[in-house]
């Protein structure tokens, strides 16, 4: 199998091809899911921030490399395909910005990808952030916390798009995230979520978006207090939750667990077999992984961060 120049040329076709490859390669050690790519589609389409190389075989996409922000490699290839991993890593080094730090984050099961990076002069960064692959079998029941009085959990209604954006921006305000005090980053005062109504409109056009898997918790005052989106790939029965957030003033009420487990239940009723989520696994931001562990998600894999200093 060789690396072909990317056949699709439009941004939408490139995202679709990346999703096709991710769906085909989904397995117990995979990290890229069609849902995560749908959520990241705006970043992928941004040619100023991204470079994409598709790997084609017989006219079909079978893997890819995505350089993000000029220096970070996202890689999706067959776990045992050492030749393709080496070719894509060489492409990454040639195309990345020639200064500063090059970074990559690959699944621990993807030994050829890790070896390709090591052969290219990368080293494992043991203190760098890494991600977990946490999964929940939809047939395994997990008790839900009682819903606080006056709150309701349901799908997003038509016309609530602006409310969902407000909920997401409040939940993902970097100043209000539950950082451990010793790991709290030094953020500029203007740091904020960039999510917008237009960004949501773009995501709503992406496969496999469906409105009944956008779960919200409505507060007694009528505002949205928590939300999550689940993305079900019917080809392999796996869904991914991306993103999930709770508005700061409503944290500690069990709403994160409630919307998460509602999504798991709905995926199961639609025929899905498992739900995955990818929180950070390091101690720099443990809140998310602790939430999902309390929902019955089990860690099945992690990523390995690698770096190469170009200075």
Image (tube, rainbow, N blue to C red):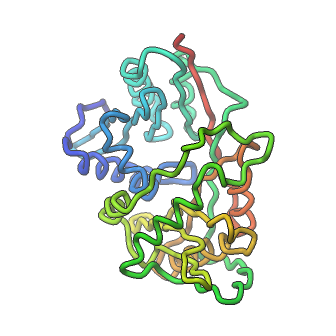
Residue at image location 51% in from the left, 24% down from the top: 116
Count of numbered labels shown in the rendering: 0
Q: Is residue 108 visible?
A: no
Please say if 248 is above or below 217. above
Residue 80 vs residue 66, the one in the foreground: 66
Can you say whether 293 is above or below 159 in the image?
above
Residue 187 coordinates in the image, percent (x, y): 63, 39
Q: Residue furthest front?
A: 189
Where does the image place residue 167, in percent across and percent down from the top left?
53, 67
**Horizontal relation, residue 142 to residue 310: left or right:** right
Quadrant of the image containing the N terminus: top left
Residue 168 appears in view:
yes
Q: Residue at x 20, y 43 (%)?
A: 8
- Which image quarter is the C terminus in? top right
Q: Residue at x 55, y 37 (%)?
A: 106
- Find residue 169 and report its horizontal and vertical position in percent: 52, 59
Q: Residue 291's x, y, as percent? A: 71, 63
Find the residue positioned furthest to the bottom: 150
Left or right, 7 with respect to 143, comes to left
Residue 260 to residue 102: above or below: below
Q: Residue at x 25, y 32 (%)?
A: 4
Q: Residue furthest right?
A: 182
């Amino acid at each position: 199998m060789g690396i072909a120049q990317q056949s699709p040329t439009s941004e939408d076709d490139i995202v679709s091809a990346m999703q096709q490859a991710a769906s085909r390669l989904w397995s117990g050690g995979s990290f890229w899911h069609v849902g995560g790519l749908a959520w990241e589609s705006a970043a992928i389409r941004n040619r100023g921030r991204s470079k994409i190389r598709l790997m084609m075989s017989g006219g079909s996409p079978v893997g890819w490399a995505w350089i993000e922000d000029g220096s970070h490699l996202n890689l999706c290839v067959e776990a045992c395909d050492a030749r393709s991993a080496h070719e894509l890593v060489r492409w990454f080094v040639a195309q990345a910005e020639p200064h500063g730090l090059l970074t990559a984050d690959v699944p621990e099961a993807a030994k050829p990808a890790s070896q390709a990076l090591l052969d290219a002069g990368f080293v494992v960064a043991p203190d760098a952030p890494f991600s977990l692959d946490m999964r929940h079998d939809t047939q395994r029941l997990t008790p839900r916390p009682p819903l606080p009085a006056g709150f309701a959990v349901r799908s997003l209604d038509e016309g609530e798009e602006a409310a969902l954006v407000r909920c997401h921006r409040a939940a993902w305000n970097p100043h209000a995230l539950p950082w451990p005090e010793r790991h709290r980053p030094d953020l500029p005062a203007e740091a904020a979520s960039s999510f917008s109504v237009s960004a949501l409109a773009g995501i709503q056009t992406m496969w496999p978006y469906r409105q009944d898997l956008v779960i919200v918790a409505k507060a007694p005052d009528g505002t949205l207090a928590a939300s999550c989106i689940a993305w079900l790939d019917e080809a392999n029965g796996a869904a991914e939750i991306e993103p999930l957030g709770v508005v700061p003033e409503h944290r500690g009420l069990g709403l994160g667990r409630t919307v998460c487990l509602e999504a798991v239940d709905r995926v199961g009723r639609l025929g899905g077999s498992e739900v995955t989520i990818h929180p950070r696994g390091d101690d720099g931001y443990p809140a998310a992984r602790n939430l999902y562990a309390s929902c019955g998600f089990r860690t099945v894999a992690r990523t390995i961060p690698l770096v190469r200093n170009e200075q």
